[in-house]
Amino acid sequence: MSVIKPYQFLPKEKIEHLANDLLRRMEGTPTFPNWPGVAERAVDFLDLGMVWEKIPHQDGRPVAARIYPTQRLIEINEDIPKLQQDFGFAESTIAHEVGHWILHINQDEADGIVEQLELSLDCVTTEQPFLCRDVGERIALNSPQTQADWIEWQAQYFASCLLMPQYKLEEERRGRDLTKWSHLYAIQKDLGVTISNLTNRLQDLGWIYIPKGSKQIYPGNTVRHGQTKIF
Ligand SMILES: [Zn+2]
């Protein structure tokens, strides 16, 4: 068995379920999910490490972060100023790496290799870190084409579900009007996400609709009530 799982199709519901499951498991622990900053709490809960490092470009494109499964280590690129300056972007990137850990890494196998390395220092590991480019924008512009694109899409969708679970959004929308930008910015601040993360998530859920190229927010028509509590 390989440390990295072979590609598999994952429906959105399955990815959302896995993100909710992680939030549920975090409940009652010192890393109890609360916002903003839920991505780092998930990293702690999963006993992963996280460091800021210089990560070289890949194929001429900047790499936001990567994960070394056998070291349980997430590296965030310190050369991308936006990651240091934009809390929401950093949260999204970290949650994306957590997504790879949950969705794409054979965790037993990763741990097994760590054990073997500890036993034998002569062992040469063949790590295959996931390299994460600034996928949010790329995938927003182009639909995923290759399996590698889909793997990135899955991790990003997981990040969106982890940072903005429906039960939390239900809580946030109470007393607010989702068609007002000022209210969306208030929610964005509470959750520690970027405004585009938030509007993409709300549009994906059908709670709002923003026509392409427009700043006008319309109410969605598929609002669901009372079905989304996970606790
Ligand atoms: Zn990635």
Image: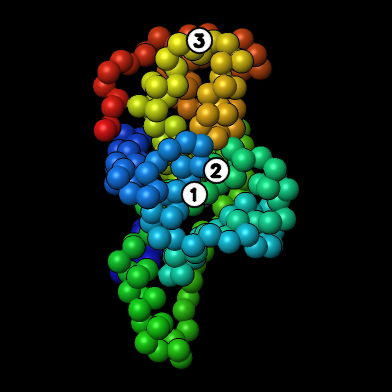
Q: CA distance from mark 1 to mark 2?
A: 8 Å
| Earlier sequence position, callout 1 versus callout 2 | 1
The colour scheme applied to this rendered structure is rainbow
- Tell whether circle 3 marks a residue whose Cβ is less than 8 angstroms from ligand 1: no
In this view of the protein, which residue sits in the foreground, 51 or 31?
A: 31
The vertical placement of 112 against 231, above or below, is below
Amino acid type of the residue that numbered disc 1 sits on in the rendered structure: Glu
Residue at 39% x, 76% y: name it: 114
Residue at 42% x, 24% y: name it: 169
Amino acid type of the residue that numbered disc 3 sits on in the rendered structure: Asp
Q: Secondary structure at mark 1?
A: helix
What residue is disc 1 on?
40
What residue is disc 3 on?
177
User: Which quarter of the image is occupied by the N terminus?
Assistant: bottom left
**Residue 172, picture quadrant:** top left
Q: Is residue 97 left or right of residue 86?
A: left
Give x and y (percent) for residue 154.
Answer: 43, 43
For label 1, the crowd category at 10 Å Cα-Cα, with few meaning under 14, some 14 to 19 and many 20 or more, is many
| Earlier sequence position, callout 3 versus callout 2 | 2
What residue is disc 2 on?
91
**Residue 229, picture quadrant:** top left
Q: Secondary structure at mark 2?
A: helix
